[in-house]
Amino acid sequence: MHLFSGPVRKMKAPAQSTTLQNGDRVAVVGGGPAGSFFAIHLLKEAKKLNRQIEVVVVEKRGPAEPNFEGFQCKGCNFCAGIVSPRLNEILDQCGLTVPDEIIQGHIDYIWIHGQWKNVRLRVPDDLKMYSVYRGSLPGRRTGRPAGFDGFLLGEAVKAGARIQYGEAQAIAYNAAGMPTLTIKLPSGETAAFDASFVSIASGINPHYGMDSCADHFTASVKRLNPSFVPGRSRRTLIFELDVGEEYLQRKMNREIYFLEYGSKDLALEHTALIPKGRFLTVAMIGNFVDHVILPRDSRQIIQQFLALPQVDRILPGIAAAPLACACAPRMTVTTAISPFGRRFAIIGDAAGSRLNKDGLYSAHVTASGLAHTVLHEGIDEPSLARGYGKTVHWLAADNRFGKMVFAVSRAAFSTPLLSRIVYQAFATEYKVRDQRSRPLSSMLWKIASGMSDYREVLREMRGHQVLRSVLMGAMVTLRNMICELVLGIRWGKYGRYPTVVVKEKRQGLKQHLAASLGMPLDPPPDFERMYEIKIHGSNEEIMTELARYGRPDSRFLRLRFIDMRQIQGTPNRVGSVIRYRVPFAKLEAELRLTRQVGSETVLYEADDRLVNRGRLIFDIAPTRDGNRRLAVYAAFDYKKGRGIASRAMWRTGRFLFPEFVHDVVWNHALCTIKEDVEERMARWEMKVLDSAPASGPRTDLIDGPQ
């Protein structure tokens, strides 16, 4: 059987060098993002050049009925499913607006977790990042599940492409020197398809569990171009948990998490946690995953991963969530050699993809590069090497730089001391620098989001500004470690979270506190510090923890050489008094709770024995995701003394207890409060889970304990 028995224009023997012309037919093998992007770019550019090009997309998943304004691509697409800000900008430039039914979740923050040190990166207001499903899985999705691949394929059809359902099994040259595809149709029949040019976007997972090198179609490509060598690949493990939309909104609303370490028994390099409606997508790579064989090995890894303490702290009780689906596809780690020949070229994952990040953007890069080449350079092998070869070479070079970037990044986040230095450098930048002058933060954002080429990231990583921030972080880390040792501060199981309030938010927080208390907080004192942390808990739970301030059972603000004790009144009520005493120095002061606003704000004021105008404010405010932000405001004027002896004494005291000590103490205190509150919340949620029916998603964990 011969599909489309003749091309629109009569086929001639190929010229030595030619571009696509009027009446030429282009076959695109694969209707995924790379194939759809290629069809869209080719048809739009051909229209500008006033050339009539016929584009036929050969897609094995189907036929299926149209869905919204696109097509439903059945099955799984083996992808974490993140549309990066970089790709979204490309979509905007192409006039492609992703429908709301495809977007599973908008992302405002990226968390990087490394050895209990946690860094949060905000997606800039002028950029957009979101999660999607590529296909129709997992099967538990309700309604008419929309996929990103189907949307792009529909846009290709709108641009003028046609779809031929069937599976391309081989490619060869016919007697006229034109490429001919052998296609297995949905009916089971085999048909031949002639074209002037073939773009191959079949990916590296044409059949699940099969290496692309063993694929019959790939073997036929090698026969056309013996120089073609597929890129190396490794396994990933991707699985979906049916967690419940309300639970995810509470724990990960508009956030994604990147975990840069596993455990001694579970060697992982990089894991992404991505919320998508009621489901959580987990995508991981690492030595443990490289040798996975479904289903036994994957189940073991999933169970081990969900039992990791860092995972349980982010999503308590997640190990009990139903598993919706799982797969172990391959991902490219090197670029293919010579992925083109006379009148054909390979794009997408089979040609190469940016290392560990943004495969969808890589698909666009290869697709647009090839579309430009075949219309402006030529479709013979030298022209493809000259034009499209630049794109392939860029991708190969970028991945070489990427290997160095990720080697440094893994070392920084998986080593306890180095991860603390990076964490401290990050926090210091937010404390002392303006938004536009935070080089380490900017570099981490580019790595996490895939916004920049790896060459640029590596250049910044080796640049003096980032190195200066890291050096400053190392010095502050050493200073803080000495301070913690002297004061007896122990972190133990508690994770570290930046608690600094960035410069641009301090005045706003101060105004909020003044409005809540109904009193001014000016003029500026000698010492003024603000700290904040987000807590998955209610006002009542946080206030319950704050009520331990100054009590023997408190696990925060317990410092060596300083005795803090509640000596009067009821905790968190006006009249409560906390006494500070340094026994060996015979120094003593009291903090009295003088104002309380519901379960949101309390104000302590200090007597004048050690400081003047001393104020300590705790404030709890709701966050957009239904959680709470605990803020601390500490301010006072230093004692000056009147005579020479008294002035010298107060200066000595200020020297022995410098301002940075407050940063160390309150960072530990807030992280401890957060962990203790969330641990109690997790125990309550587990009780609810244990008493709930065994089947169905966990949608009843939004309300905290009463």
Image: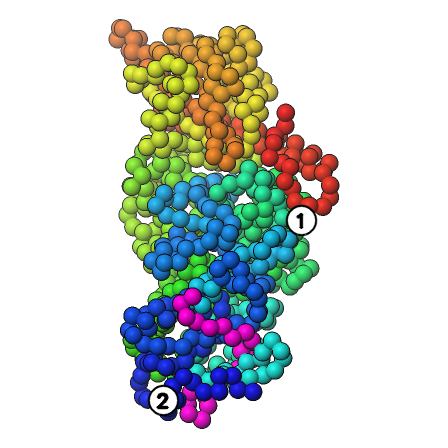
What residue is rendered at 55% in x and 84% in y?
191
Residue 516 or residue 312, whichever sits in front: 516
> Quarter of the image containing the N terminus?
bottom right
Confirm or deny contact between disc 2 and disc 1 (CB under 8 A): no
* Mark 1, secondary structure of its residue: loop
Specify whether residue 165 is painted magenta: yes
What residue is rendered at 53% in x and 60% in y?
67
Relative to 339, residue 526 above or below: above
236 relative position to 178: left or right: right
Residue 591 or residue 280, whichever sits in front: 280
The Cα atoms of the two marked residues, 2 and 1, are separated by 57 Å
Residue 133 or residue 51, whichever sits in front: 51
- Of the residues shown, which amino acid type is indicated by label 2? Pro
- Of the residues shown, which amino acid type is indicated by label 1? Pro
Q: Position of residue 324 (x, y in %)?
A: 64, 53
Q: Which residues are magenta?
A: 158-178
Q: Residues within 10 Å of mark 1 (few under 14, many from 20)?
A: some
Q: Quadrant of residue 378?
A: bottom left
Q: Which residue is mark 2?
A: 14
What residue is rendered at 52% in x and 41% in y?
252
Determine the residue located farthest toward the top in the rendered image.
643
> Quarter of the image containing the C terminus?
top right
Q: Which residue is mark 1?
A: 322
Residue 4 or residue 318, whichever sits in front: 4
Q: Quadrant of residue 316?
A: top right
Q: Position of residue 79 (x, y in %)?
A: 52, 59
Specify whether residue 587 is painted magenta: no
* Among the two numbered marks 2 and 1 on one chain, the one whose residue lies closer to the N terminus: 2
What residue is rendered at 56% in x and 35% in y?
493
